Amino acid sequence: MQTTVREIMTTRVIWVRKDAQFRELAAALRRHRVSAFPVLGDADTVIGVVSEADMLTKEALDPGTLSGLLHYRDAEKARGITAGDLMTHPVVTAAPEDTAEHAAQVMYKHKVKRLPVVDPDGRLLGIVSRADVLAVFDRTDEDIRKEIIDEVLLGEFAADPRDYDVKVGDGVVTLAGTPESDSVAREIVQRVRHVQGVVAVRDRLTPGSRFDVPASFPTD
């Protein structure tokens, strides 16, 4: 079972137009108790995100005296007066069909706290945050164990669950048992790592051991 972005995203999103003024943005941040806005362009597509950090650049830096020491983009933001001036772009987005795991990977890679969720034409559908994707870890250990046995071992690997010992504690899975080969063992561990709610996997598999029996050869 993989949770999709559609299932966890917030659909009531506060957004702004690219010509929204700095004072308007600051007031909206306080009023709606959010830390960032998607910015919409002329075609109602998402063209950027303006955050508290973007706005703080203007307040914290003086482009008139420090522009030579600033990164070009920071200097431009320090001079900015509209959402279009201040926003971070190009924008990193998610699709509603993406998995929560994929969204988390994108956030980590791009060092962002949230992703606007858009349709194929780039129009805003919702927003997904770090807190949203971390919510997938709120599963019981028994649910995780049942999925590993029923969907992974039985469903994907056609393995006999009696050959495996699956223990789950606080999202940490300990796998013991006798897969037929090293490659199968690696595939099982890799697949279990991607089960929703799994925090870590402790590999105690001993590939091929159930086949280690003495050979009998005829004598002359």
Image: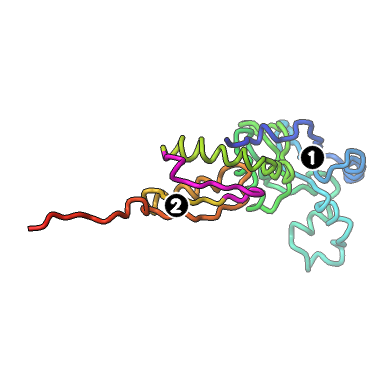
From the viewer's perspective, is the residue at label 1 or at label 2 nearer? 2
Residue at disc 2, secondary structure: helix
Provide the residue designation for mark 1: 18
Q: Is residue 17 left or right of residue 162?
A: right
- On whether residue 46 falls in the magenta region, the answer is no
Residue at disc 1, secondary structure: loop
Question: Quick one: 205 or 219, which is closer to the camera?
Answer: 219
Provide the residue designation for mark 2: 186
Kind of residue sitting beneath label 1: Lys
Q: Quadrant of the C terminus?
A: bottom left
Q: Which mark is residue 184?
A: none
**Residue 47 appearing in the image:** no
Identify the residue at horizontal 64%, vertical 39% (top origin): 94
**Residue 18 appearing in the image:** yes
Quadrant for residue 82, please give it.
Answer: top right
Identify the residue at horizontal 58%, vertical 49% (top origin): 173
Give percent across and percent down for residue 115. 70, 42
Q: Is residue 86 left or right of residue 30?
A: left
Q: Are marks 1 and 2 in contact (CB under 8 Å)?
A: no
Query: Number of labelled discs?
Result: 2
Give percent across and percent down for residue 40. 75, 36
Quadrant for residue 31, please give it.
Answer: top right
Question: Quick one: 204 or 111, which is closer to the camera?
Answer: 204
Give percent across and percent down for residue 27. 92, 42
For the residues labelled 1 and 2, the Cα–Cα distance comes to 49 Å
Depicted 135 relative to depicted 208: above or below? above
Q: Residue furthest front?
A: 219
Q: Which residues are magenta?
A: 159-173
Query: Which coloring applies here?
Result: rainbow
